[in-house]
Amino acid sequence: MERSSLVDGSLREGIGLRGYGQKDPLLEYKREGFQIFENMLREFRDDVLTKLFRVQIEENPKWNKSIRHENSHANEL
């Protein structure tokens, strides 16, 4: 089952009870859905930043040699 349908189902269950508390179910549904969306974006942003800060750039000696070789030929022209 997809995440969106799981979220939708759990939202509907909780919102149905809000009608008994004199709250507009549609507004509550939108409000909680937006909160879930914001949390998802925050988690995504945190995951991306965590991975970016853990990146370690390594030098590839073979790649550097080929660039130097290409540059030396370009300088000869």
Image: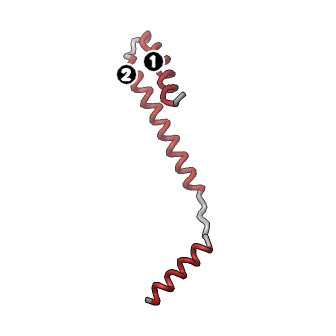
Which residue corresponds to mark 1?
A: 15
Q: Residue at x 44, y 28 (%)?
A: 33
Task: State the image coordinates of residue 28 (x, y, percent, origin top left).
Answer: 41, 21
The one of 37 and 59 positioned closer to us in this rendering: 59
Q: Residue at x 51, y 80 (%)?
A: 70
Few, some or many residues within 10 Å of mark 2 (<14, 14–19, 20+): few
The one of 3 and 51 positioned closer to us in this rendering: 3
Few, some or many residues within 10 Å of mark 1 (<14, 14–19, 20+): many
Q: Residue at x 58, y 73 (%)?
A: 63
Find the distance from the CA under tag 2 to the CA under tag 1: 9 Å
Helix, strand or loop for disc 2: helix
Q: Earlier in the sequence, mark 2 or mark 1?
A: 1
Task: State the image coordinates of residue 35 (x, y, percent, origin top left).
Answer: 45, 31
Task: State the image coordinates of residue 10 (x, y, percent, origin top left).
Answer: 51, 22
Q: Residue at x 41, y 26 (%)?
A: 31
User: Marks 2 and 1: CB-CB under 8 Å?
Assistant: no
Which residue corresponds to mark 2?
A: 27
Helix, strand or loop for disc 1: helix
Task: State the image coordinates of residue 76 (x, y, percent, origin top left).
Answer: 46, 90
Figure check: 38 above or below 17: below
The one of 35 and 1 positioned closer to us in this rendering: 1
Considering the image in quadrants, where does the C terminus appear? bottom left
Figure check: 4 above or below 22: below
Q: Quadrant of residue 59?
A: bottom right
Disc sitting over residue 53 in the figure = none
Tell me the kind of residue under disc 1: Ile
Pick out the residue farthest to the top: 20
Tell me the kind of residue under disc 2: Leu
Position of 46 compared to 35: left or right? right
